[in-house]
Image (cartoon, grey):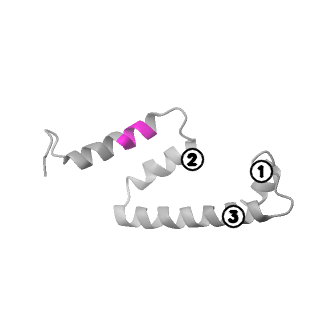
Amino acid sequence: MSVSEGGLTSREDRNHQRIVEVLENPATHFWLRAALKTALTKDPVDALHDAELLYLLLKERWEALREADDFLGAADFNEIHRWAE
């Protein structure tokens, strides 16, 4: 395992750089940026479990919306936001 000057392994260094790129990318949605910043302050295993649960819930929501007869796609924000209430 190679260690950089800052004490990080090359894998940790690559991960850190990728996180910085996502946080600094203007195309990154504000909620994703906020969630990532918050996750970085948490225990990594807890953050990973929470992220996995979030993924499953959002995937199920998308599948339910996609299957709905009246689903018009992302343009129908009123219907989509109804789910968040």
Looking at the rendered structure, the kind of residue marked 3 is: Glu
Q: Are marks 2 and 3 in contact (CB under 8 Å)?
A: no
Q: Is residue 27 above or below residue 67?
A: above
Crowd band around label 3 with a 10 angstrom C-alpha radius: few (<14), some (14–19), many (20+): few
Magenta stretch, residue numbers: 18-22
The residue indicated by pointer 3 is: 63
Q: Nearer the viewer, mark 2 or mark 1?
A: 1
Disc with the residue nearer the chain's start (2 vs 1) = 2
Label 2's element? helix
Disc 1 marks a residue whose amino acid type is: Gly
**In the rendered image, which residue does mark 2 sit on?**
31
Q: Position of residue 45 (x, y in %)?
A: 36, 66
- Residue 30 visible to an observer of this rendering: yes
Residue 63: x %, y % from top left: 69, 64
- Report the side of 73 relative to 42 (left or right): right
Q: Position of residue 73 (x, y in %)?
A: 77, 50
Residue nearer the viewer, 85 or 1: 1
- Decide if residue 9 is on the left or right side of residue 57: left
| Residue with the mark numbered 1 | 73
Residue 43 in view of the camera? no
The residue under label 2 is which amino acid type?
A: Trp
Identity of the residue drawn at 38% across and 43% down:
19
Task: Examine the rendered structure and indicate whether residue 37 appears above or below residue 71.
Answer: above
Q: Characterize the local packing of mark 2: few (<14), some (14-19) or many (20 or more) Cα atoms within 10 angstroms.
A: few
- Residue 72 position, x and y percent, is 82, 52
Q: CA distance from mark 2 to mark 3?
A: 21 Å
**Badges 1 and 3: C-beta atoms under 8 Å apart?**
no
Apparent side of residue 50 relative to residue 73 in the rendered image (left or right): left
